[in-house]
Amino acid sequence: MLHSNLHMPTELPTQQRIYPIRTSGDIPKKLEIVGNSEGLQEIQQLITTVAPSESTVLILGETGTGKEMIARAIHNRSSRVQKVMVKVNCAALPANLIESELFGHERGSFTGAFDRRIGKFELAQGGTIFLDEIGEMPVELQVKLLRVLQEKELERIGGKTSIKVDVRIVAATNRDLEKEMAQGRFRPDLYYRLNVFPITVLPLRERRSDIPALAAHFLQKFAGRENKQITKIPDRYMAALMNYNWPGNIRELENVIERSVLMSTGKELSGCPLLSSSYSEGPSSGGAIKTIAENEKEHILKALSICNHKLYGPGGAAELLGINASTLKSRMNKLGIGKKFMAGSPRMA
């Protein structure tokens, strides 16, 4: 039976397996790994094994699966916990800025360099640097990163001296780096340096047993934030959550629960537009079961419709689905809906 009467105590039951993670810094932040699937328990064991070491870790998984949360768990359970963990999203930075962001620059080293800039590696001295979406790093910069891994030193742009760095590297990607190597977009020597201790995170659709605990966790989080006394997830709503394909994974689930909390007025969680419209119709009269790709296509189209075909930015389909715009665009092209919608909507170009 799905959780038709999911009461929300101050702390969730032990069987829902909420693992508190130590944090440090001036502003404490509670981090939790929520779920009870076999895959999640294996990840917990891998974190416990690798965290005390100095080994480089490569976290592999789709967008929204919780890779940053795992990186923070590794840092917070390591001997470097009293130092900072610095995050760099390699996909979010223009190619011409990544080098300066990572390694810093000297004053006058290029047009616009009016002051010396300390890079992220130096800022993370003694701690951990989390290189998110490492597969997006330009090949020419991969050589400099390899030097940091091999020699534990770097040079700022325009600098003439080497700077020693004591930093643990945790990297993450949603790409298949072996394919990227085969196509010449990722250096094999860097891959083998990063892939010392790989951790693969399964997508949410392959660990559905985690959904009730995650839904309860997010309900408690957002109901508390909004000062709402929502104590139940209806059976029909939970069934919809369990049957949905979650292309945006945990991030999308979090967004769905947040929207639902905002729309709810009583003690029971109400449906959000994306789910209620998708699951109110039930199976077709012929009883045919749709493929995963068909379901994903349907939900992306529905999200686009809800967002008036807006793909990017606030209120766009990517935000609604809990995935970044480039991932959504890639999925649309793969499912054969990208060209049609991009041709019909300038906002999606």
Image (cartoon, rainbow, N blue to C red):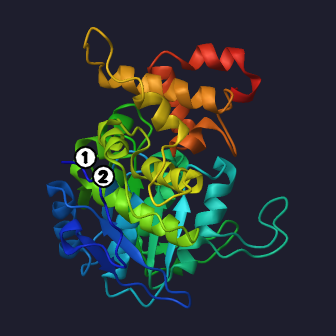
Q: At 47% from the left edge and 68% from the top edge, which residue is drawn?
A: 221
Q: Give the secondary structure at mark 2.
A: helix
Alpha-carbon span between mark 2 and mark 1? 5 Å
Q: Is residue 276 above or below residue 82?
A: above
Q: At 30% from the left edge and 58% from the top edge, which residue is drawn?
A: 5
Coordinates of residue 62 in the picture (x, y in percent): 38, 45
Q: Is residue 183 above or below residue 283?
A: below
**Which residue occupies the foreground of this view, 266 or 302?**
266
Q: Give the secondary structure at mark 1.
A: helix
Q: Is residue 283 above or below residue 232?
A: above
Image quarter for residue 123?
A: bottom right
Q: At 46% from the left edge and 37% from the top edge, which residue is drawn?
A: 275
Along the horizontal axis of the image, is 229 left or right of 8? right
Q: Is residue 161 above or below residue 262?
A: below
Residue position marked by numbered label 2 in the rendering: 211
**Which residue occupies the foreground of this view, 173 or 298?**
298
Residue position marked by numbered label 1 in the rendering: 208
- Circle 2 Cα neighbour tier, 10 Å, few/some/many (<14 / 14–19 / ≥20): many
Given the image, on which type of amino acid does mark 1 rest?
A: Arg
Given the image, on which type of amino acid does mark 2 rest?
A: Ile
Coordinates of residue 159 in the picture (x, y in percent): 67, 72
Along the horizontal axis of the image, is 293 left or right of 209? right
